[in-house]
Image (cartoon, coloured by chain):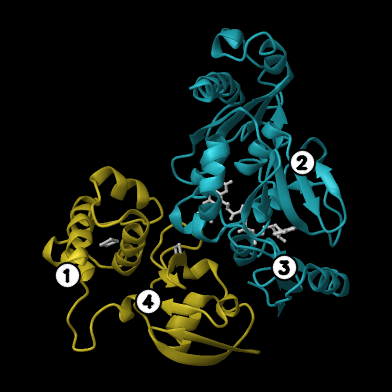
Amino acid sequence: MYNFTFHRPTTVRQAAGLLARNPDGKLLAGGHSLLPVMKQRLAQPSALVDLSLVEGMTGVELKGRSVVIGAMTRHADVANSQVLKDVMPGLAAVPGSIGDPQVRNRGTIGGSIANNDPNADYPAACLGLGATIITNKRRIAADDFFTGMFSTALEEGEIIVKVSFPVAKKAAYEKFKHPASGFALVGVFVSKRGPDIRVAVTGAGSNGVFRVKSFEEALKKRFSPKSIEGMSIPATGMNADIHASPEYRAHLVAVLARRALAKAND
Amino acid sequence: MAAVSMTVNGKAVTGDVEPRTLLVQFLRENLRLTGTHVGCDTSQCGACIVHIDGIAAKACTTLALQCEGAKITTIEGLAEPGGKLHPMQEAFREHHGLQCGYCTPGMIMSALDIVRRNGNNLDEHTIRDQLDGNICRCTGYHNIVKAIEAGAKAMAK
Ligand SMILES: Cc1cc2nc3c(=O)[nH]c(=O)nc-3n(C[C@H](O)[C@H](O)[C@H](O)COP(=O)(O)OP(=O)(O)OC[C@H]3O[C@@H](n4cnc5c(N)ncnc54)[C@H](O)[C@@H]3O)c2cc1C
Ligand code: FES
Ligand code: FES
């Protein structure tokens, strides 16, 4: 790892100020994506701004018809949140499926979303529920936030403070785990909130997380696995690597979407 | 260099470290607590697991400076001062839960976290599932699972 200076602000303002003064600096949340890439020398920030002492950035709260999660809330704390398990167990299952217990004890929702790994789980939940990402500057709809592999709409020095998820009556996530890494080879999040139907896919697309409009359209009549029986998506634009071919990933999208729909209707 | 202070196995410690110093390096190289191991470079093997404020974490994926003011427990902090093993350590000995022993400190620190989260009555499925972040190249896991089941029960006594 290359060396850097280390800072521990206690407010979002201070953190933003430190980033402004250290243009090559980076925020540090749980460190479970950033530190591994720094160890490999694939990233070399001049400064790390640790958010762990910043007040008001953790917790899961029900606010009206939304669940609001602080950016620094650890995966384990979201997965175990009673509030969340009561109103939307389908969302609580997402952090519960991330990595291993030790990763869940350190990794945070804000770090996961900012990182936008093409195989990460939270981006599917954000897009699959139409979440709003709340930063120190503005509110960004999930549809506009994820702009491609490891890339987001966040500007220089912008800090995610919380994420707001509308409560959907029906919501579920199905993930085909890569057996070694635990990441999603493919993961599908489905939800229905009134007329708003969403099917979001992670792990498969070569441009990161995406929605399957053809499935969403077909589900308008009835939100059931039967409505997309026999449907498939084209293999073009799917990821190809040693783990799976584009055809296999496209196939998994349809299979997992049907399973997620069955789970959501349970 | 930056000053860091924390409590390790009940003792207040301080050190002067580079910001890039990992917690595992601080423990092993500054404090000479070499029970915490490094088995990979990819945050996947769990040989480095310690407890930070009572919660299991990978010391290879945590900076020493992130632990300023924290309470750390390592494998060295489990046995009683006279040398009597912790019930989980005793269970690993009794059930032959180790061969080369490289993964063992991480396995035991992870096992204690499984008990924290799931209580003292653990079934095989839970244990195997929750050991997702610990890799052992020797044992085939079978006796590790048995040891954890027995150790968890012994801890309740
Ligand atoms: C062994 C292992 C297995 C894993 N398995 C999975 C898995 O199955 N599924 C999965 O989804 N993930 C997995 N992960 C990744 C894990 O979930 C990470 O914790 C997460 O992606 C990043 O969160 P973090 O809090 O650790 O962020 P960090 O690593 O601290 O930061 C990641 C990036 O986000 C930026 N950032 C952090 N917080 C903010 C903020 N509030 N505002 C703006 N930018 C910010 C940082 O500057 C950095 O660029 C795994 C990781 C490991 C090590
Ligand atoms: S050395 Fe920490 S996980 Fe392998
Ligand atoms: S006993 Fe040798 S690695 Fe587990």
Which of the 4 image quadrants contains residue A192? top right
Relative horizontal placement of residue B129, taking residue A74 as reference (left or right)? left
Mark yes or no: residue B65 visible: yes
> Quadrant of the image for the N terminus of chain A?
bottom right
B91 to B21, vertically: above or below: above
Q: Residue under mark 3: which chain is it in?
A: A
Which of the 4 image quadrants contains residue A22? bottom right
Q: Residue at x 57, y 32 (%)?
A: A186
Crowdedness of circle 1 by 10 Å Cα count: few (<14), some, many (20+)?
some
Q: Amino acid at mark 1?
A: Glu
**Secondary element at image label 1:** helix
- The numbered disc on residue A146 is 2
Mark 1–mark 2 distance (CA, rounded to whole Å):
50 Å
Counting from the top left corner in percent of width and height, residue A185 is at: 55, 35
Counting from the top left corner in percent of width and height, residue A215 is at: 67, 16
**Secondary element at image label 3:** loop
Q: Earlier in the sequence, mark 3 or mark 2?
A: 3
Mark 1–mark 3 distance (CA, rounded to whole Å):
44 Å
Mark yes or no: residue A184 visible: no
Which of the 4 image quadrants contains residue A8? bottom right
Counting from the top left corner in percent of width and height, residue B44 is at: 46, 56
Would you name the residue on which mark 1 appears?
A: B90
- The numbered disc on residue B74 is 4
- The numbered disc on residue A44 is 3
Q: Is mark 4 within 8 Å of ligand 2?
A: no
Mark 3 against mark 4, which lies toward the viewer? 4
Q: Are marks 4 and 1 in contact (CB under 8 Å)?
A: no
Q: Amino acid at mark 4?
A: Thr
Q: Amino acid at mark 3?
A: Gln
**Secondary element at image label 2:** strand
